[in-house]
Amino acid sequence: MRITGQRPADGRRKAMLKAGILILFIISAIGLIRFTPIKNYLTVEAMGQFLESAGLWAPFVYMLFYALGVCLFLPGTLLTGLGGAIFGPYWGFLYVWFGAMAGASAAFIIGRTLGREFASSLIGDKLKKYDDAIERNGFATVLYLRLVYFPFTPMNFGMGLTKVRFRDYITGTGLGIIVGTFIFTFFIGTLKDVWASGNWEDLVSFKVFFSIGLFIFSFFIPKIIKKFKGED
């Protein structure tokens, strides 16, 4: 009698191979950014010149760069700050949000494709209930973690290892990053506009003080969220 299907041992080996590829990808991505000349081009001046040469395609190039940067573990604050500084507070917010969503989606898919099988094999009875809970409450879980500024890129890959549904992950992410993204791009973009105009008297204006106030307020958002949830 011929037995068809994949044997458990073959499944484990396949899962371990995928997990190994994921780990190698993460290590390589971090090393590429930290220990190669690429880091020298991650400045407002260098990126501004590059995007200027792209012309009308500059927003799309930037969003693609943002998405790639997320997958390569570039700091989200750096990517967002570049968007606000280059495109200003309003267009910067729009391009940053779309770039962040594309990057978050790609990182999640990488984590889910390469790491979920191995993670599932490690989950025992005690951890399974948490994995099932994330599946049931995926949207609320992702939204909460985004609002309290859980590290962006690690969460993208990490959520791919859980049972959370992609639609819950992407909607929770989309709503959860709006506030922080707007505050940061508005703050950076406003200061950049004042710097570029050379009108230093504009530093004493409602827009500047409002942007500074929003920026300071952003640091209290996690505590406010936790207080509403009844956490210490």
Image: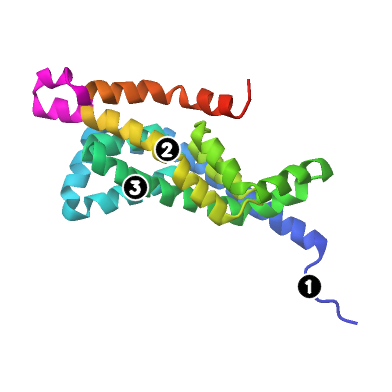
From what the image shows, is residue 199 above or below residue 92? above
- Element class at badge 3: helix
Q: CA distance from mark 1 to mark 2?
A: 41 Å
Q: Quadrant of residue 167?
A: bottom right
**From this viewpoint, is residue 159 visible?**
yes
Secondary structure of residue under mark 2:
loop
Could you tell whether 183 is left or right of 201 in the image? right
Q: Of the residues shown, which amino acid type is indicated by label 2?
A: Leu
- CA gap, disc 2 to disc 3? 10 Å
- Cα–Cα gap, marks 3 and 1: 41 Å
| Percent of width and height locating residue 7 | 81, 66
Which residue carries the number 2 mark? 74
Q: Nearer the viewer, residue 117 or 148?
A: 148
Q: Residues within 10 Å of mark 3 (few under 14, many from 20)?
A: some
Which residue is denoted by mark 1 in the rendering?
5
Question: Can residue 201 be found in the magenta stretch?
Answer: yes
Instruction: Name the residue: 52% across, 31% down.
Output: 148
Is residue 35 shown to the viewer in this render?
Answer: no
Crowding at mark 2 (Cα within 10 Å: few <14, some 14-19, many 20+): many
Q: Earlier in the sequence, mark 2 or mark 3?
A: 3
Question: What kind of residue is marked 1?
Answer: Gly
Q: Quadrant of residue 34?
A: top left
Q: Which residues are magenta?
A: 191-207
* Total labels drawn: 3
Is residue 167 on the magenta stretch? no
Q: Please say if 190 is above or below 5.
A: above
Determine which residue is flagged by label 3: 65
Indicate the position of residue 217 as horizontal and vertical percent values. 39, 23
Residue 110 placement (x, y as % from top left): 54, 53
